[in-house]
Image (cartoon, rainbow, N blue to C red):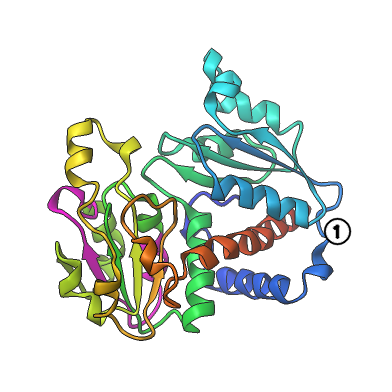
Amino acid sequence: MKNLIDILDLSVEEIDAMIAVANDIIDHPENYREACKYKTLATLFFEPSTRTRLSFEAAMLELGGRVLGFSEASSSSASKGESVADTIAVCCGYADIIAMRHPKEGAPLVASMKATVPIINAGDGGHNHPTQTLTDLLTIKREKGRFDNLTVGLCGDLKFGRTVHSLIAAMSRYAGINFVLISPEELKVPSYVKNAYIKAKNIPYEQTTALENVIDKLDVLYMTRVQRERFFNEEDYLRLKDCYVLTPEKMAMAKKDLIVLHPLPRVNEISVAVDDDPRACYFRQARYGKFIRMALIMKLLEEASK
């Protein structure tokens, strides 16, 4: 049985195949309306979410399936002290596939060891967010037409940003990639991410604290928010939360075919004045998330039935 815990659980070929399916769903949604008829997805969200949870639920419903679950730990038996393993053991009796978000790194991996149905990691702490990365990849492919020979800028919270860590891992497998890592000193990419995916593959990269100094060379700009929920004290969060704000003035310095991505939610890091710029892809990106999750659900259910 196949699970999706880490983006590297999927080969490049499997990702390409899923992107092809997602594109076909976009073009021919009527062909998929009963693809998961009589199947049930459980969304077990021990941490708040809007896009990820709703896009999973929309994906399953559009495939003709059913959805059950909870949207916060306080509305589950976790609030009574139930372990992740026990929650999963119970939910496997109710669902054919599970999407799980948890604040603790490694919780979905633990769940997969207990599960008798496929487990999808919908985000675990500051570690991984593979379905967001699939969303990012579909967006890049649709907007840029390729994955290779791109200069990718990642800006903001690169320390706790699980979407950043997953995207670096995924993009490191393509040829001609350059990374530009833009963050304050306190929120730099962790050394284990840099060593495993950038240095180990001799991928060119630069680190800077100034977005305006590098925006002109980027093909992809991945903005992230500084995450209040990952900080141990409010003082550090308040000091760093507005360190990068993407404005029309900064966009004027960028390439005409730059694409701006953001996993959302945004707080202040992208001015609303940027929303009407055709290079701003983040709302299209959120929409694409539904289609790639549809492709993933079908793939994992098909694997589980073999």
Q: Is residue 25 magenta?
A: no
Q: Which quadrant holds the C terminus?
A: bottom right
Q: Residues within 10 Å of mark 1 (few under 14, many from 20)?
A: some
Between residue 195 and residue 63, name the one nearer to us.
63
Question: Residue 42 at what x, y percent from top left?
Answer: 69, 39
Query: In the displayed structure, would residue 81 be above or below residue 50?
Result: above
- The reply, left or right, for residue 252 in relation to residue 236 is right
Q: Is residue 190 above or below residue 76?
A: below
| Magenta residues (range) | 167-190
**Residue 184 on the magenta span:** yes
Residue 270, picture quadrant: bottom left
214 lies above or below 161: below
- The residue located at (54%, 22%) in the rendering is 74
The three-letter amino acid code for the residue at tag 1 is Glu
Q: Which residue is tagged 1?
A: 34
Left or right of residue 197: residue 139: right
